């Protein structure tokens, strides 16, 4: 299982690179992953999408279909 070290914590990732424990998620962690992907500083528009997807996942237990995002 892949892991990532961040702020002194070891976080387990699934085979797609998502956090195994969603309780470890924070805006700081999200920004870290964005930096790792070369996105740079997340803008307000990015955060709208991140929060919409996160809220959907927390409510339904799955990521939304792409047509719900666009």
Image (cartoon, helix red, strand yellow):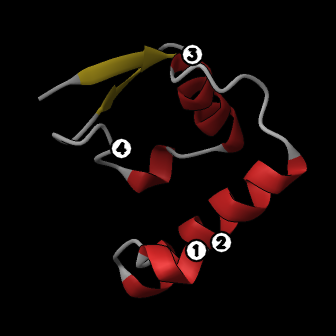
> Where does residue 27 sit, x and y in percent of width and height?
70, 42
Contact, mark 3 vs mark 1 (Cβ under 8 Å)? no
Which numbered disc flags the more N-terminal residue, 2 or 4?
A: 4
Contact, mark 1 vs mark 2 (Cβ under 8 Å)? yes
Using the numbered discs, state the Cα–Cα distance from disc 3 to disc 4 in whole angstroms: 15 Å
Give the residue furthest to the right. 44
Q: Is residue 54 left or right of residue 66?
A: right
Residue at x-position 36% and y-position 19%: 4
User: Which residue has dot 3 on it?
Assistant: 7
Residue 69 has which mark? 1
Disc 3 crowd rating (10 Å Cα; few below 14, some 14-19, many 20+) is few
Disc 4 crowd rating (10 Å Cα; few below 14, some 14-19, many 20+) is some
Contact, mark 3 vs mark 2 (Cβ under 8 Å)? no
Location of residue 64 with respect to 46 vertically, above or below: below
User: Which residue has dot 4 on it?
Assistant: 19
Q: Nearer the viewer, mark 2 or mark 4?
A: 2
Using the numbered discs, state the Cα–Cα distance from disc 3 to disc 1 in whole angstroms: 31 Å
């Amino acid at each position: 299982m892949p892991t990532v070290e961040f702020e002194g914590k070891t976080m387990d990732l699934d085979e797609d690179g998502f956090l195994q424990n969603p309780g470890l998620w924070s805006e700081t962690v999200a920004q870290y992953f964005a930096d790792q992907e070369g996105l740079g500083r997340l803008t307000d528009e990015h955060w709208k999408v991140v929060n919409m997807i996160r809220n959907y996942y927390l409510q339904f237990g799955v990521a939304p279909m792409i047509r719900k995002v666009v």
